[in-house]
Image: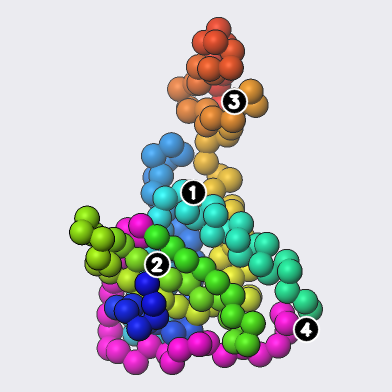
Amino acid sequence: MEQGQVKYPLGAVSSIGAESFGQPGRRTFRLDLAAGAARSFVWLEKEQLYQLGIYLQEAIRTLSKEDRQRAGQAGEPPWSGGEESVEFKARQIMLSYSVPANYFYLLAYEVEEGGEAAASISCWLSPDQGEMLSREALQICAAGRPPCFLCGMPINPEGHVCPRANGHAVLESG
């Protein structure tokens, strides 16, 4: 999907954060974005949020100190529309870094069964905003169910029958 096809080009966001709701094992995840009078809630899978956090962390780690301190300019104008609220479940998320802009570009969209994009947002994040989002995303993902030390699968509050132990050991979290 190209920038011209995005339904809600938010420009540089004033805030972006990661959130989770529910108990471990039954949580839902979303990004909360604000730009001008627009607000967007993009629901994600845990793995999408985790990969977003990892990518941002690695990309920011590769930036030099000079790049981190250099003023940036979003690659599209700020949100000029009125008050808007958009909420959807992201089927695909793309993130890239623009060296000339010194900003990250985030594109998220929902795909309908016919293959057409139903809802889509794009926005630009500064390296500082990206670093904060990365930290939040990774903390939220780590706060879930602990992994089994044998198989890596999550241990539910009611216990876990580990396939590596051939069902002979029931492991508990805590």
Please say if the residues under marks 4 and 1 sit with CB atoms less than 8 Å apart.
Answer: no
Q: In x, y percent, where is residue 122?
A: 41, 76
Residue that appears at 43% across and 37% down = 25
User: Which of the two labelled residues, at mark 4 and mark 2, occupies the earlier sequence position?
Assistant: 4
Q: Specify the color scheme.
A: rainbow
- Residue identifier under label 3: 151
- Residue identifier under label 4: 66
Looking at the picture, tell me which residue is in the foreground, 14 or 79.
79
Distance CA(mark 2)–CA(mark 3): 32 Å
Residue that appears at 73% across and 82% down = 67
The three-letter code of the residue at mark 1 reads Glu
What range is drawn magenta here? 66-91
Q: Quadrant location of the C terminus?
A: top right
From this view, report whether residue 52 is shown above or below residue 146: below
- Residue 21 in the magenta stretch? The answer is no
Looking at the picture, tell me which residue is in the foreground, 30 or 174.
30
Q: Secondary structure at mark 3?
A: loop
User: Which of the two labelled residues, at mark 2 and mark 3, occupies the earlier sequence position?
Assistant: 2
Residue that appears at 58% across and 45% down = 142
- Residue identifier under label 2: 108
